[in-house]
Image (cartoon, helix red, strand yellow):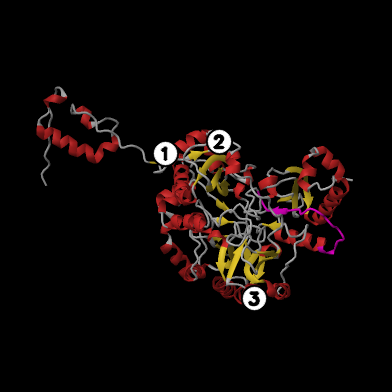
Amino acid sequence: MTETSTTFPAGTPGSFTAAQKEYLQGFMAGAGVSFPFSVASELGQAPAPLAPEPTIYGTALADLCKEELWKHKEDPLDSWERLIAHADANRFPDAENMYRFKTHGLFYVAPAQDSFMIRLRVPACEITAHQFHGLADLASEIGNGHVDLTTRGNVQLRELKPRDLVTVLTRVQELGLTSRGAGADNIRNVTASPNCGFDPSEVLDVRPYAKAVHHYIMNHRDCYGLPRKFNIAFDNGGSLTVAADTNDIAFIATRISEKSVSQVSGLNPQVSLGTYFRVQLGGISGHQDFARDTGLLIKPSEATAVSAAIVRVFAENGDRTNRKKARLKYVLDKWGFDRFFAEVQKKLSFPLVRVPLTACEPRRPLIKHGWIGPYKQAQKGFTSIGIGVPVGRMSAKQMHGLATLAANFGKSELRLTIWQNVIIPHVPDALVASACRQLQHLGFTTEASSTTSGIIACTGSRGCKYAAADTKGAATKLAKHFTSSDLVVEQPVNIHFTGCSNSCAQHYCGDIGLIGAKQPDGADGFHMVLGGGMDHEQGIAREIFRGVRATEVPALTERILRTYNAKKSSGETFVQWTRRHSDKELQEFLSV
């Protein structure tokens, strides 16, 4: 092989011949990474512009948290082959796949359990007897024989092996259900008041609007992969709470009437008499904040478009570097409502209208613990039966029994509540007593208790790696303690057990809230907060006791309620009593 050398005469870059320039360009294209100068500039040419650094909604890749980098690398919705591979190998996931599988509602919950949990979506909290039977079969065949009802009106199946990942997903879909987006950085189950369609006092049956939002999410890929999780609730304005003010978006059904309009002057001419949704934004009880009224009033038919616009503005502007600040609340805190709605308006084809709250009819009173027991329906001759499910856990046998009852006594329909209970609607009045007896025979309660009907608990340390205490175990022991006690409390009290600061059971919103806290010796314990509430009792509970051993919770809780009984004014609720006393006063009252 003959080597050919090329010599270059001295002189300015402009003296290079065309052949010399071509040689230099080709040579340096291959070796340029080793040289700290631009060939183009040496040749008298303008340097090529550098390619812009890729960003995610304006955030540089280098600044993203690891979850955002995983999403950038591959959309978690495109994980089917990964799921098949893990099922074929019966293999548990690494950290990255653990995160990806959450988008499909699958949670690897080790070390609490060396298994998966699947969380479903039950839009508007409405499920059929057929679906309930199917889930009971799944729980028996590939789960642990039980299901858990959650504080978002949906269902979890537990202790699934990796080999069953594809099986459970396909069988859930065959039942007409889905788990897509039930975890990770997505919009969670869209909830609705559990007595929609049969509540005599409701303003609007909101189920069609909640389901419309659900199906919009399912069919628009850009509604996934948000900066963090996102909650949406629809309140029918009736007698039962759906805790709408703890959600990122709360749609509250309301009316504009001649009487309510008379309370304001200069009402926007685009608003006429009728039924609307009032919009609240930014609830996140784990961060000690409720959704705030925005003044926004929309037609029910506009709810899906408004939801999508809000979600997209959040997706484009939420924090993708710090997951502790990556919720809608923090965008609102930074911008305020005016700027936020200016961005939302850009995504809508109709104008947003904001009116004073006083222009709307006041919210109807809520029935505390109204999710338990028989209640007359709007439909003459029919009754709904609220069923107490201790700590939200039921066996497959109980599920089959409940589904059969719903078919035989009702219309094969069940409603799940955010209080981890179930309602069977459309029971003929003449059959209510018989249905209640059969429900009690299955191990459920059908009579409201002022102390036990408001006990809810998150999964706890037996099934969640984040929890610092066995919340369901502690809640069950407290309920049994009250059942055997002679304590009588006139006003209903809600007691919330949550295992960690994620606050899945919303401990800050309970009359009495308990958050898991390990004791120095490793035993289960709780910090105790008092005086929280939602809706008309809205307020964040205050911490009164720290490090209470789990074994001491029943006796301390009873002492709190007996002290309340002894010191309250006539008709005073627990929330009212605690809020008129300082922390120090409460500690002195209750430590005796």
Res. 523 in view: yes
Of the residues tagged 3 and 2, which is closer to the observer?
A: 3
Residue 551 image offset from top left, x and y in percent: 80, 57
Q: On the image, which quarter does residue 281 sit in?
A: top right
Q: Is residue 449 above or below residue 533?
A: below
N-terminal of the pair, mark 1 or mark 3, is: 1
Which label belongs to residue 401? 3
Of the residues tagged 1 and 2, which is closer to the observer?
A: 2
Q: Which residues are magenta?
A: 483-500
Res. 98 in view: no
Q: On the image, which quarter does residue 524 sit in?
A: bottom right
Q: Is residue 455 left or right of residue 336?
A: right
Amino acid type at image mark 2: Asp
Q: Of residues 503 and 494, which is closer to you in this image?
A: 494
N-terminal of the pair, mark 3 or mark 2, is: 2
Assess disc 2: are there few (<14), some (14-19) or many (≥20) residues with their C-alpha within 10 Å of its C-alpha.
few
Look at the magenta stretch and give its main secondary structure. loop
- What is the C-alpha distance between the residues marked 1 and 3? 54 Å
Residue under pointer 2 = 333
Residue under pointer 1 = 60
